[in-house]
Amino acid sequence: MKQLLLCLLTCQFIFAQKKLVPLQTYFPPKGNWESRTPGSMGLSESTLNEAISFAMAHETSMPKNQELAQIYNFYKEPLSDGIGPFAERKSSSGVIIYKGYIIGSWGDVNNTEQTHSVTKSFLSTLIGLAVEKGLIKSIHDKVVDYVPMIEPYDPNPYRTGDQIGQPQFIKPFDSEHNRKISWDHMLRQTSDWEGVLWGKPDWADRPDDVPSAWINRKRHEPGTVYKYNDTRVNALALAATTVWHQSLPEVLREKIMDPIGASNFWHWTGYRNSWIVLDGKLIQSVSGGGHFGGGMFINAMDMARFGWLTYNKGKWNDQQLIPESWINLSTTPTNANPGYGFMNYFLNTGKKQFPSAPASAYAHIGNGTNMIYVDRENELVVVARWVENKYLDELIGKIISAVKH
């Protein structure tokens, strides 16, 4: 009897000890990501396979040539011609991560392709790191106080007459309206920034009206009206470059991509004409969103690593790569658009973005559609590429059904 009692007490102690030890989060090492079968994770394999088949069956009709797609998708825009670079896409691809492990995938997940506006989330991350480092004191500071006159690179600087040797400086935040714009306004796409950058005026991107009306429109006070606009995102990328005093891809590689074990195949480019001279060095100001070309070229597996990083509130193994407070700010809505945080965190406020998903879920979304879906309640990260936008919620609903079966 004493032995039985001792055994029971010992078992209770061991069980109690196990309860006190939290399960360690899995972070994939560089070059490898552990896969597990859905069944071994307690999921419905048949439902998950149905979701994958659904994704493959609903590939976007967008041309695979992304330069043609630029015209195809934005043919209603003035000045919609691309300034590149561009890349050919493959068929639909994606990967499903559950509790940190791969439980399913489809297509070529290792092909490096444009991810379009998912690029914005990488850009906003670097703004967060600049705040952490003290390069930006507050996101409510005016951007103009941080951005000098910028000298663009001119391959033929020698002009005639009075213009000989005179650089044509860029002053992106120097108008009466633009001087009122803060970093927060730019991150939330509520700035109503005005101007022309890299040959593209702000009114050339998704105009509400004919160009003449758009040019002469009444400017909204910064922070009051949301407007998705990549010319303004490019202005933010230029401002961030001057704050870091180096190219943003170099900062991203050092601070984020190498620590999370990303491949060596991703690259982030600007337009063919977006070169500046900074500190005596020739630097390309990258495309912040991929509209008109450029942006982040990346494979699905590296996208999943970034999604797993934001899922874990900016932490990777024992390193806090992005401040948790920045992730929290990034997923905080505003009155101007309750469904949008910092670029490009699309929130599920009121379950409007994804009716089938929890309200706490969010997604990094780009044209195509390219998507990194992040769902802490269901312990999911899903990368879906080149799936028709109108089917994304149904796809997510099927994946969640496999988890909750």
Image (cartoon, helix red, strand yellow):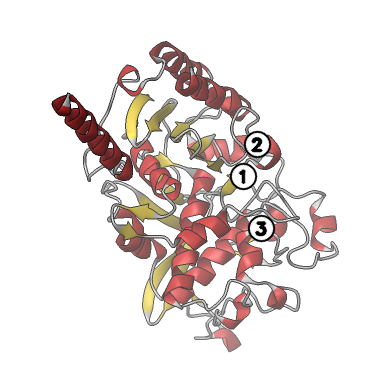
In this view, the residue farthest toward the left is: 3
- Check the image and name the residue furthest to the bottom: 162
Question: Which type of secondary structure does the marked residue at label 1 adopt?
Answer: strand
Q: Which residue is mark 3?
A: 189
Q: Which mark is first along the chain, 1 or 2?
A: 1
Q: Amino acid at mark 3?
A: Gln
Question: At 54% across and 34% down in the image, what residue appears?
Answer: 369
Mark linked to residue 353: 2
Q: Which residue type carries mark 1?
A: Leu
In terms of secondary structure, where does tag 2 sit? loop
Left/right placement of residue 69 relative to residue 49 reads right
Give the x, y percent position of residue 168: 56, 79
Q: Mark 2 near mark 1, Cβ–Cβ under 8 Å?
A: yes
Name which residue type carries label 2: Gln
Give the foreground label among 3 and 1: 1
Can the viewer see residue 121? yes
Which residue shows up at 40% across the image and 54% down it?
268
